[in-house]
Image (cartoon, rainbow, N blue to C red):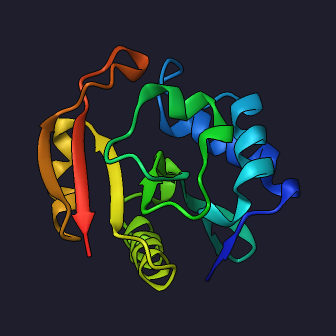
Amino acid sequence: MKIRTAMAGDLKELARIEARCFPEAEAASAEEMRRRLEVYPDHFWILEKKGKIVTFINGMVTNERTIRDEMFCRAELHEEGGEWQAIFGVNTLPEYQGQGYASLVMRQVIADAKVQGRKGCLLTCKEELLPFYERFGYRNEGVSQSVHGGAVWYDMSLIF
C-alpha cells in the first residue's frame, strides 16, 4: 500500500470511485473532478493497494471557516496559502470499506495539513458519520448551512 497525491491520469478512476461512493446529486461530476485536479492535485490523497486506487480524500484550501456549497463546483476558490484544509470527499470503494483505509488516508491528510502550517481541517458530513470523524478529533459544530445535493450536513472542524 502507498499513499500519494493525484496525477492527471487518475481522473477517470477518481470520477468512477466518486460516483460509486456518493449519490448522484452529491457526487462531483467528472468535469468538476477534472477542474479540481488541475487546480489542486496536491490536495488529493490517494491510497493504492497493489496498484489499484481504493481510497481517496480531496478538498481545497481556504481562509473561510466553513465550507460553502459553491466551493464544490468552483475549484478556482482554492487558496494555496489558506489557513484551513477543507475536505470535500472521503471515498473508499464499497468492497474495501471497513478495513481502515479511509482512516489511514485521513491521518495522512491531517499530518500534511499540520506540516503545511494550516490552522486545521474542515469538512461537512451526514449525521451517521459524526462518530467516525470525532475519532480523529473533529468537533461537531452543528447543522451546516450547506444544502449540497439536498442533504442535511453537519459542519466539523479539527483545530490544531
Quarter of the image with the C terminus is bottom left
Q: In the figure, 21 relative to 54: above or below?
A: above
Residue at position x 51%, y 79% from top? Answer: 116
Quarter of the image with the N terminus is bottom right
Q: In the figure, 116 relative to 58: above or below?
A: below
Residue at position x 56%, y 59% from top? Answer: 56
Image location (x, y in percent) of residue 97:
41, 57
Image mark count? 0
Work out which residue is located at the far right of the displayed protein and give it.
Answer: 9
Q: Is residue 81 toward the left or the right of residue 130 in the image? A: right
Image location (x, y in percent) of residue 113:
46, 74
Front one among 26 and 69: 69
Q: In the figure, 66 relative to 146: above or below?
A: below
Residue at position x 23%, y 50% from top? Answer: 156
Image location (x, y in percent) of residue 89:
48, 47
Residue at position x 51%, y 26% from top? Answer: 70
Work out which residue is located at the far top of the displayed protein and give it.
Answer: 150
Q: Is residue 90 toward the left or the right of residue 6 in the image? A: left
Q: In which quarter of the image is residue 2?
A: bottom right
Front one among 147 and 70: 70
Front one among 23 and 153: 153
Image location (x, y in percent) of residue 55:
55, 61
